[in-house]
Image (tube, helix red, strand yellow):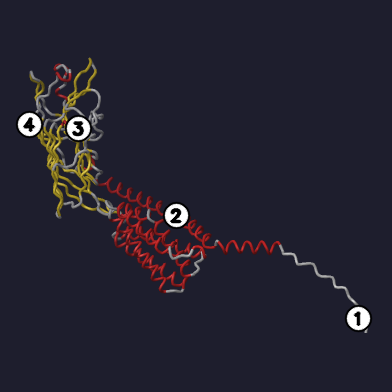
């Protein structure tokens, strides 16, 4: 049997596909650096989630503006913040033939005894602190020396001299204000002729007597019932100025150029006394010509509302990057240590839930006390994230851990918000402890094997 020799030519070696090699190289790269890429994406997500937090800050500003408008509406009908300036004595004289000017004289002694009766008015959901006050203003003018101002006695128009009292908002005057001048009763008229002295006020002509030593003035007493909102200030126009105020408001804020020499804040209100000398301010006792700034040394009391919802909400939002960043870091460590997988979309949903906390906080704080609003918003957010975590990781233990971590974090932020004076110290110590915890757990990760 003859066999034929069939020549079998060997097949050419199979050439590797370039597309296949490229796919293998690409897969190998992502497998090798998967956790690093994931960390980068998480960092980007944290920065992206700062956009809604910035929008929440804008929402807070908008609500603050509405609150300001509500306060302005109430103040416009009741009376605005008030500043009492004076009384001061204005004496016209002829500076040139046919040209009149005013000589301004401030009292030697000025005393104000007042009672402040505050109350809370509401406009929608907003609260406005308003007050009624009973002020007894007294003092005296000594002999007025014309020679020190280079005024000739014969040029003085004594019959046109008047006593002027500055009041910021005339709508707040609730009685027919008058003055007892040297034992005689006179009633004020609205407006002040010397508008460069103060914009709003009232005036009354008073009798003066010329003597060889100057002009003889006298003493005065003014009984003024005044309504206002927010604050009551005084200008220290006396050579010696003494202000005594009492009120049943429990949260006063003493403000302006001078603090009280003595004050007592108690459960039933406060009392405060100021003593100011002419040496403590920057304007003289008398002048002609150029106007002096009588409001440069104003002082008084503000009716401080102890809870400022929007201010505390703003402070809370400033810590949003800390809460979002640390929460994402916890999930990332769970992925590394427990070999769970969390999709970037799930990170986004968790981040949005953490952002919704702030809108809940603002909405609830407008209706409730800030602490209660923070508690409710925090509990709802922690429950939402914990339940979602249990569903994603299929682990109740992990969800409980996430809930505990968020509870500690929100509690820590709340303590910082409430502790205004120690906020920086507590925040720095808290961040140091958090960093130490992160470093402790990260040492267990075998980075070279990832």
Q: Nearer the viewer, mark 2 or mark 1?
A: 1
Badge 4 or badge 1: first in the primary sequence? 1
Badge 1 or badge 3: first in the primary sequence? 1
Q: Nearer the viewer, mark 1 or mark 3?
A: 1
Q: Which residue bears the numbered disc 4? A: 182
In which image quadrant can residue 110 be found? top left
Q: CA distance from mark 1 to mark 3?
A: 130 Å
Badge 3 or badge 2: first in the primary sequence? 2
- Location of residue 423 in the rendering, given as x and y in whole percent from the top left corner: 30, 53
- List the single residue furthest toward the bottom: 1
Badge 2 or badge 1: first in the primary sequence? 1
Badge 3 or badge 4: first in the primary sequence? 4
Q: CA distance from mark 4 to mark 1?
A: 153 Å
Viewed as shown, does residue 88 lie left or right of 368? left
| Quadrant in which the N terminus is drawn | bottom right
Q: CA distance from mark 4 to mark 2?
A: 69 Å
Q: Which residue bears the numbered disc 3? A: 281
Q: Which residue bears the numbered disc 2? A: 50
Query: How busy is the neighbourhood of tag 2: few (under 14 within 10 Å), some, or many (20 plus)?
Result: some
- Judged from the image, the secondary structure of the residue bearing numbered disc 2 is helix
Q: CA distance from mark 3 to mark 4?
A: 28 Å
Q: Nearer the viewer, mark 3 or mark 2?
A: 2
Query: How busy is the neighbourhood of tag 4: few (under 14 within 10 Å), some, or many (20 plus)?
Result: some
Q: Nearer the viewer, mark 3 or mark 4?
A: 3
- Location of residue 370 in the rendering, given as x and y in whole percent from the top left corner: 30, 59
Q: Nearer the viewer, mark 4 or mark 1?
A: 1
Examine the rendered structure and indicate whether residue 138 appears above or below residue 422: above
Query: How busy is the neighbourhood of tag 3: few (under 14 within 10 Å), some, or many (20 plus)?
Result: some
- Location of residue 381 in the rendering, given as x and y in whole percent from the top left corner: 39, 65
State the mark number for residue 3: 1
Examine the rendered structure and indicate whether residue 86 appears above or below residue 408: above
């Amino acid at each position: 049997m003859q066999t034929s020799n069939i020549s079998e030519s060997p097949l050419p070696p199979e050439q590797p596909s370039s597309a296949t090699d490229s796919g293998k190289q690409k897969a190998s790269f992502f497998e090798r650096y998967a956790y690093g890429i994931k960390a980068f994406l998480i960092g980007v997500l944290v920065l992206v989630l700062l956009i809604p937090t910035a929008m929440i800050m804008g929402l807070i500003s908008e609500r603050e503006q509405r609150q300001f408008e509500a306060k302005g509406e109430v103040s416009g009908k009741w009376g605005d913040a008030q500043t009492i300036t004076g009384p001061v004595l204005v004496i016209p004289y002829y500076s040139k033939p046919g040209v009149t000017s005013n000589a301004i004289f401030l009292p030697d002694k000025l005393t104000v005894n007042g009672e402040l009766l505050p109350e809370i008015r509401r406009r929608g959901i907003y609260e406005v602190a308003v007050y009624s006050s009973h002020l007894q203003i007294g003092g005296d003018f000594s002999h007025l020396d014309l020679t020190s101002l280079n005024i000739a006695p014969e040029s003085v128009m004594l019959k046109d001299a008047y006593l002027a009292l500055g009041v910021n908002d005339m709508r707040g005057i609730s009685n027919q204000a008058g003055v007892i001048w040297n034992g005689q009763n006179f009633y004020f008229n609205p407006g002040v002729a010397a508008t460069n002295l103060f914009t709003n006020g009232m005036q009354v002509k008073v009798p003066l007597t010329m003597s060889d030593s100057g002009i003889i003035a006298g003493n005065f007493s003014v009984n003024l019932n005044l309504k206002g909102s927010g604050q009551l200030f005084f200008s220290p126009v006396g050579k010696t100025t003494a202000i005594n105020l009492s009120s049943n408001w429990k949260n006063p804020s003493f403000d302006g150029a001078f603090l009280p020499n003595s004050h007592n804040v108690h459960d039933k209100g406060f009392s405060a006394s100021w003593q100011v000398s002419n040496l403590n301010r920057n304007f003289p006792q008398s002048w002609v010509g150029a106007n002096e700034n009588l409001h440069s040394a104003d002082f008084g009391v503000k009716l401080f509302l102890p809870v400022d919802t929007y201010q505390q909400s703003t402070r809370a939002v400033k810590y949003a990057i800390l809460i979002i960043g640390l929460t994402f870091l916890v999930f990332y460590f769970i992925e590394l240590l427990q070999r769970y997988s969390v999709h970037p979309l799930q990170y986004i949903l968790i981040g949005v839930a953490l952002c919704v906390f702030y809108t809940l906080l603002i909405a609830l704080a407008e209706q409730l006390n800030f602490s209660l609003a923070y508690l409710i918003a925090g509990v709802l957010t922690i429950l939402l994230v914990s339940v979602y975590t249990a569903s994603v990781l299929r682990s109740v233990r992990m969800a409980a851990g996430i809930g505990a971590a968020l509870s500690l974090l929100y509690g820590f932020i709340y303590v910082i918000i409430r502790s205004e004076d120690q906020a920086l110290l507590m925040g720095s110590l808290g961040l140091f402890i958090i960093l130490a915890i992160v470093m402790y757990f990260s040492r267990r990760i075998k980075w070279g094997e990832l």
